[in-house]
Amino acid sequence: MKIAVVGTGYVGLVTGTCLAETGNNVICVDINVEKVKKMQEGQLPIYEPGLEQLFHRNINQGRLHFTTSLAEAIEEAKIIFLALPTPPGGDGAADLSYVLGAAKDIAGIIKEYKVIVTKSTVPVGTADKVRAVMSKETNLEFAVVSNPEFLREGVAVEDFMKPDRVVVGTTDERARKLMGELYAPYVRQGNPVIFMDERSSELTKYAANSFLATKISFMNEIANMCELVGADVDMVRRGIGADERIGKRFLFAGIGYGGSCFPKDVQALAKSAEENQYDFQILNSVMSVNEIQKKVLVQKVKKFYNGDIAGKHFALWGLAFKPETDDIREAPALYIIDEIVAAGGTITAYDPEAMPNIKNLLGDKIKYAEDPYQALDGADALLIVTEWSVFRTPDFDQLTSGLQSKVIFDGRNLYDLDKMEDCGFYYNSIGRRV
Ligand code: UGA
């Protein structure tokens, strides 16, 4: 099938590449001339495990193309995916100007029936808005479909190729058939393509992310309780996760959820509730718990040094908002760095993938190390902020000799408490004994 993908951000690129992988002919369009040129030359602009191989294979086999011309991209495409940014506007509601702008342009160009699919996370009612904008521009028939994306950064290729489910919101029979055909190769193991109306589909995306964020905030509050009553959040997590109604996944306490999705989507759903005169109480708590949790690690550090960290030097492991990505959007590391530097502390940081992004953003605000152990040089303590695998089983002798004092603050609960005690570390983690 011929497919166009408008927008080559994270979702657009993964979608385009993975759709090409099953034999579709995909053309991705972006207004960024420089970026398109690089992709035409075979350079992948993002880091995502497994994507590079697929990207090159599909370019080499002539199924994946890039252009800056919207007209060229959509000329032969049956299905046009909109994977454009929907950043939070000043009032917290999603800004739809990119999506609606592209829809208007597309409507001005099309010469036959097309299926326009919103892949971006968009508020309920957006399909209707897209339809209205397009109807003003064209008398031709078209369908607007909501097809939210549930992939996670770091495992995006696997999530796209073998999704738990595909949600397709449309009431147009032709579009339903085409979307069913398109996704058939991805759900061969029997996972469902769930068809529904556009509004339910749009809300499904926000409900999924908000529910997951709720799970995290809930566990973070349980962790805080654990510290007060002398319980261990890892034990409680295992104890409740064994109940299938609760589930094992997404119950890890930490230093708050970050990234480009949860903070934005929870806020957007709360905003949408407000616009509908509904007081979505749980969501408001989820957000405020997260704000508090972001501060927990720095509070622990300050408490340890009796409120005075001026002149203290810290090693910081992990800058990306989570492992297997170079993404630092809403990363807890940013807040931690700000607070420590503002209080007169200094930092040397290391991350396996996010160093270029953080250097661009922070410049010489902090120092940078070439590897995890170099970051320890002369540090009073180690702060663990992202749970990269490489930090999970460190060489504890090197840790001991590298640090000035055997002090670790771990925002991700990576190490066994008994082991740390045996090694003689002061080890302060989340929701566990110190
Ligand atoms: C999230 C969703 O998991 C995807 O299903 C969704 O498609 C995506 O948003 C999106 O809307 O585009 P992502 O932001 O890539 O994916 O990252 P997650 O793995 O969900 O992690 C989000 C945040 O929650 C991270 O800061 C992570 O550290 C935190 N987290 C996650 C916890 O604190 N505890 C957990 O148990 C799990």
Image: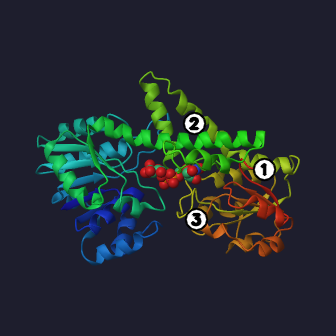
In the rendered image, which residue does mark 2 sit on?
Answer: 286
Report the residue that reaches farthest toward the bottom.
Answer: 60
Residue 352 image position (x, y, % from top left): 60, 69
Kindly report which numbered mark, 2 or 1, lies closer to the viewer in this rendering. 1
Tag count: 3
Q: Residue at x 43, y 38 (%)?
A: 207
Q: Residue at x 78, y 61 (%)?
A: 418
Q: Is label 2 within 8 A of ligand 1 (CB to nearest ligand atom)?
A: no
**Category of crowding for the residue at label 1, using alpha-carbon neighbours closer than 10 angstroms: few (below 14), some (14–19), many (at least 20):** some
Q: Secondary structure at mark 1?
A: loop
Disc 1 marks a residue whose amino acid type is Arg
Mark 2 and mark 3 lie on one chain; the one further toward the N terminus is 2
Q: Which residue is mark 1?
A: 433
Say what secondary structure mark 2 lies in: helix
Where residue 391 appears, as percent x and y from the top left, is 66, 67
Nearest to viewer (mark 2 / mark 3): 2
Residue type, numbered disc 2: Val
